[in-house]
Image: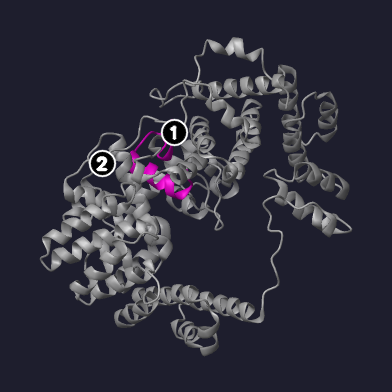
Amino acid sequence: MSRVSVRHLLTLITFCLAFLYHRESYSRSNVQPVINPQSYEKIIGYLLVSDRDVTIYKKMFRALEQADFEELDKLQKKLENHILLGAVLAEKYLHPKYKSSAAELSDWLENYNSYPQAKRIYQLASRKASDPEKLKKPVFLDNGTQAADENSVFVNRQRGRFRDYINRGKTRPARAVLENKRFRNSAPNEVWDDMAATLALKYLVDNYDRLAYEWAVKASKRHNSGTAAWVAGLASWRMKNYKNAALYFERLGKSKNSDEWLVSAGGYWAYRAYDKIGNKKKARQMLETAVKFKHTFYGILAAQKLGRTLEYNWNSIAYFNDFNNYDYIYELLGSPYIRRAVLLIHAKQPKLAEQELRFGYPTMNEKQKEAVIFIADQYNMHSLAIYVANQNKNLERNQSYDNAAYPLPAWLPVHGWKVDKSLVLGLIRQESAFNADAVSGAGARGLMQLMPNTAYHITKDIRIKSDKTRLFKTDYNLKLGQQYISYLLDKPFVDGNLFYMVTAYNAGPGNLVKWQKSARYQNDALLFIEVIPSAQTRIYIERVMANYWIYNMRFGLDNPSLEQIASGQWPSLK
């Protein structure tokens, strides 16, 4: 790259990032601007891509939206700079109304196989090519592995059977897989132990505490399985062997390899167990272990028990970049994904820009990744911002990007906020990560992931049945989501109970009622979360509640539900 090109590209990225930081700053008055607005006119004259090319790219994307491929081809011939051509052509070839040829797809792969669309283009090309083996493979597509030996095939087949049995609640045949002599001798120790821990957890939620404990102990003998220690602790707790529970929970709380949510849970439950047996010193030590994880359900609970105020980074502090010094721009030059993303934003294609940043993220260094957090936050790519912020936090260095991880979009529901705003935002963060266009595999739509049938049930609006796209409108989705929350809270089997409401929101009212009857939770609010049958719902409740509390802290509000749980009560919203 020539010195002139580098200078122009540097200036382009400087401009684009400046543009990012000064646009749509509805809740970010505390964000350090990358460049003063007055610099805009001076910089625009040095853009690598001319105003003419940017205008052409905008017209090309508009032609794509209208499926006007003839106009698209005409515009392509007028381009001088082809930096976004790969993205444009990918959208063209993947367009449902365009019939791409094998030659077009093959040529695209030759030139752009490191792009986010490469996998989809490759799949389409493989169906059309006369010899798919000759196609250039996507950069991040698995290029194949060595043929598996007979034992590996057998082990993988048995693992598949085991998962199927567990998913269908068939513990007896699942156990038979683990006890099969050939499988025991063929499976790697860690694989067998993880499967044994899974079986133990299934026994626990099925109320077979003794079997749960026995299999959890088997699973934890050879390596420090977080799940096994967790199940052994819970089974011991429910059998009222609090001393034994404390030992297993403490082991989990001191684990270096387990997930922070599980480690903080181990620490907090170790506190509970030691408190039960009167060991106050150890109980406090375990609270100190849990409180290190300030973004987790049990970490926040531990802070409440300790009377400690948690600190979060609401000021958009950058740890690796000095946005007052343009030296950091040179780091960004190393990422083609960032270069294309800022240009796509300038061409009014934020969704394609987000694809570039998400896809290219693994290739970036820490300075580039941090810049992505700020770009994503500024341009309302909240799902990406949350993901990258979580990936780059380092609690040992007190490094977190909470302003991006817990966004405050300037949305207003139809008829305003009727339900606790922090609770709604907490649900949205877990449901859709603030993606208004999200659609689940089951068909739930929009920010609050509402099923069309649920929306109709609470509104009796027949138009929902004929026009499900209405659920993608943020103000309407927020209105209906609030109505559904209120509907659930008023049900007699919920009666304002936050844990019950969140459970019903995720798993449905029918499952909540069933679990209230079947789960052995001893009227213990925390035990209820941990022993309901759905792993997905167990995780969901804790994530939503942690989100809720953190948003309240961001707004400077009290957390009465946190106080209730910490004092052994059920959390309520009345």
Which residue occupies the foreground of this view, 331 or 560? 331
Q: Is residue 465 above or below residue 210?
A: above
Which residue occupies the foreground of this view, 204 or 439? 204
Image depth: mark 1 or mark 2 in front = 2
Q: Mark 2: give few (<14), some (14-19) or many (20+) Cα within 10 Å.
A: some
- Amino acid under disc 2: Leu
Q: Horizontal placement of 345 versus 544: left or right?
A: right
Q: Horizontal placement of 564 versus 424: left or right?
A: left
* For the residues bearing labels 1 and 2, Cβ distance under 8 angstroms: no
User: Which element is circle 1 on?
Assistant: loop
Which residue occupies the foreground of this view, 200 or 423? 200
Residue 310: assigned label: 2
> Mark 1 sits on what residue?
409
Residue 12 lies, in percent from the top left, at 63, 22
In the rendered image, the quadrant that contains the N terminus is: top right
Most extreme residue toward the front is 3
Residue 13 lies, in percent from the top left, at 60, 24
- Amino acid under disc 1: Pro
Q: CA distance from mark 1 to mark 2?
A: 23 Å
Q: Mark 1: give few (<14), some (14-19) or many (20+) Cα within 10 Å.
A: few
Residue 556 lies, in percent from the top left, at 26, 34
Residue at horizontal 35 percent and vertical 67 percent from the top:
532
Residue at horizontal 47 percent and vertical 81 percent from the top:
170
Q: Is residue 377 above or below residue 38?
A: below
Report if residue 452 lies within the magenta region. no
Residue at horizontal 87 percent and vertical 47 percent from the top:
101
Q: Which span is picked out in magenta?
A: 404-433
Report if residue 414 lies within the magenta region. yes
Q: Horizontal placement of 427 versus 567: left or right?
A: right
